[in-house]
Image: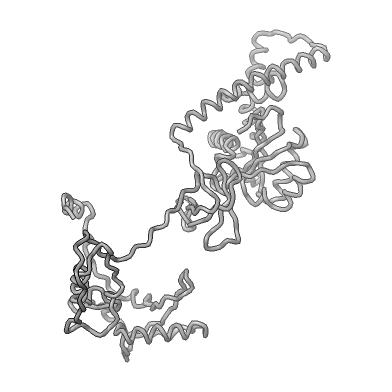
Amino acid sequence: MPIIQEPFSRVAVDIIGPLPRPSATGKRYILTVVDYATRYPEAVALANIQADTVADALLRVFTRVGFPREILSDQGTQFTAELTQQLWRLCGVRALHSAPYHPQTNGLCERFNGTLKQLIRAFVHESRDWEKYLPHLLFAYREVPQESTGYSPFELLYGRQVRGPLDLVRAQWEGVQEEEVPVLDYVLKLRERLAELAGFVQENMETAQAQQKAWYDRAACSRSFCVGQKVLVLKPQRQNKLQAAWQGPYKVVTQLGDTTYVVVSCADTRIQRTFHVNMLKAFHERPETVDAICAPAAEETEPFPLEELPGVAKQPSGVDQVQLGEELGPEKQAQARQLLLAYPGVFSALPGYTDQAIHQVDTPGQRPLRQPAYRLPEAVRESMRAEIREMLELGVIEPSASPWASPVVLVPKKDGTTRFCVDYRRINDCTITDAYPMPRVDELLDQISGVIF
């Protein structure tokens, strides 16, 4: 992060809220503005965070400190709206936006937001109208020296220590009258003071940034991705915004900086998103595996024809799909093929079933439920008929005249095909579930510990 020396040439903005306790006028949000050079903060209470409301509040702030050259914000709609972008263009302001789900980019404003919320939280116990006393809280923050600069925001902005409550009490106790200073002398001393402070602040900021970088790099590692590489993105889940999960894969389109990348979803290439490198990790595809049998090379012998074993079912089998390793000689391959043909059911391509266990659905006292079939689009009806014909041929289903009936549902899959399902929700509501004891994972691990496979 470059060190900014000109006051209010770059500012950071953010919004706090909604606050749990509104002010007396019903305002629940606070717009915060922090100067990068002096760390001087501004805060404006807002009733809503619409783009026009935020723009008016920023104009009130800029009428006191001037228009900045750069303004850093997150990607909230109030900062990316067309109204706000038009305001920046008219005022000659360059808009900078932080990466999604990476508030560290706007860390200066985020840190001030945390301090301001702590002040408000401690203050509202005495007065509900926190909006009325918000300027007093800002005054207390501005007169305290900042750790990175070594000086208070007041002193860096005005070139002098402002008179605070303690200064008033001290002057009253000591009874010392301040000497009047001519305007010309005051201006000259102010220029010298500001130049002196700028040099001290530059040194203090460089030292503070070096210390912060050293602490951060202790647990950090350098990562980079290539254009076209597939990555996963850490994003909040839709069900719970407080939980995040790796989603993807995405493909890297371009690299904006050392730590920022533009990615696009492999499923939908129309929308491009910008993410920080901390929100990305490499996506490793699983290698394709093929069933094969390999053995040490043996002496080659004359090949001989194989005879089909009696009793083998005349049905599609997965034996033909098994590939034998080239390391096996013809004799070993023949023996392996004989073994596979002896147990064709193990490698059968058709689904099997068992008659060793029977499942019983217990619905005591329930009258038969017969639901009408759901209406399906004409485009998927042929697909449903094909699924039914295939299951009848395989023996998975059979015709039934039972008084119980549940409708069929075709669920679309990601590859464009459909999954044949049955809606058993009403039957599940009246079914008594069986309580099966779940095995303990730790006990299973203890049982197999020490086993050599």
Q: Determine if residue 125 is in view.
A: no
Residue 113, quarter of the rendered image: top right
Say whether residue 260 is left or right of residue 399. Answer: right
Q: Determine if residue 373 is in view.
A: yes
The answer to whether 320 is drawn above or below residue 11 in the figure is below
Residue 342 drawn at (x, y percent): 18, 76
Instruction: Please tell me which residue is depicted at 66% across the width and 19% down the height of the picture.
Output: 199
Residue 352 drawn at (x, y percent): 26, 78
The answer to whether 30 is drawn above or below residue 243 in the figure is above
Q: Nearer the viewer, residue 239 or 199?
A: 199
Disc tally is 0
Instruction: Please tell me which residue is depicted at 22% across the width and 51% down the height of the picture.
Output: 442
The answer to whether 365 is drawn above or below residue 59 in the figure is below
Say whether residue 451 is left or right of residue 29. Answer: left
Residue 192, quarter of the rendered image: top right
Q: Nearer the viewer, residue 269 or 381?
A: 269
Residue 144 drawn at (x, y percent): 60, 23
Residue 16, quarter of the rendered image: top right
Instruction: Please tell me which residue is depicted at 54% across the width and 54% down the height of the picture.
Output: 228
Instruction: Please tell me which residue is depicted at 29% across the width and 77% down the height of the picture.
Output: 351
Q: Nearer the viewer, residue 40 or 30?
A: 40
Q: Which residue is at the far bottom?
A: 401
The answer to whether 426 is drawn above or below residue 300 in the figure is below
Say whether residue 387 is left or right of residue 230. Answer: left
Q: Quadrant of the C terminus?
A: bottom left
Q: Quadrant of the N terminus?
A: top right
Say whether residue 71 is left or right of residue 297. Answer: right
Residue 131 drawn at (x, y percent): 64, 38
